[in-house]
Image: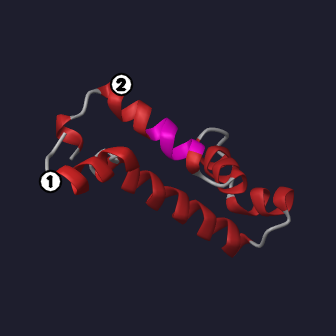
């Protein structure tokens, strides 16, 4: 699905995905990817176990994968309009 997206669209989707993450998960993801911190160091700073940090990081990656590869979400109003009228956009 990424083939049809511009760099700006990819970045916008990543930002959306990061904003939707729970705060702790986002901080763990950014610490690993941007600050080059290891799981043990993050574990010590957050009070989570190393396996919990690993799990949060994996969930962050999965969440970003879904945001990048799923079609753009359709608003509730558009879905309701389609349901009522039987029409597309």
Few, some or many residues within 10 Å of mark 2 (<14, 14–19, 20+): few
Viewer can see residue 74: yes
Which disc is residue 86 wearing? 1
Q: Position of residue 54 (x, y in %)?
A: 62, 67
Residue 79's place in the image compared with 53, above or below, is: above
Per the image, label 1 sits on a secondary structure element best described as loop
Is 67 situated left or right of 55 in this image?
left
Residue projecting furthest to the front:
84
Is 8 situated left or right of 16 in this image?
left
Q: Position of residue 86 (x, y in %)?
A: 14, 53
- What residue is at 70 percent from the left and 48 percent from the top? 27
Residue highlighted by disc 2: 8
User: Viewer-nearest of labels 1 and 2?
Assistant: 1
Q: Position of residue 71 (x, y in %)?
A: 27, 49
Q: Position of residue 61 (x, y in %)?
A: 48, 57
Its colouring scheme is secondary structure
């Amino acid at each position: 699905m990424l083939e049809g997206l511009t760099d700006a669209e990819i970045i916008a989707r990543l930002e959306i995905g990061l904003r939707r993450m729970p705060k702790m998960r986002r901080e763990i993801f950014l610490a690993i990817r941007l600050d080059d911190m290891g799981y043990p160091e993050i574990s010590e700073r957050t009070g989570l176990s190393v396996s919990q940090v690993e799990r949060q990081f994996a969930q962050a990656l999965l969440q970003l994968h879904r945001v990048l590869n799923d079609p753009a979400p359709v608003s509730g109003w558009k879905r309701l309009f389609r349901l009522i009228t039987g029409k597309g956009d």
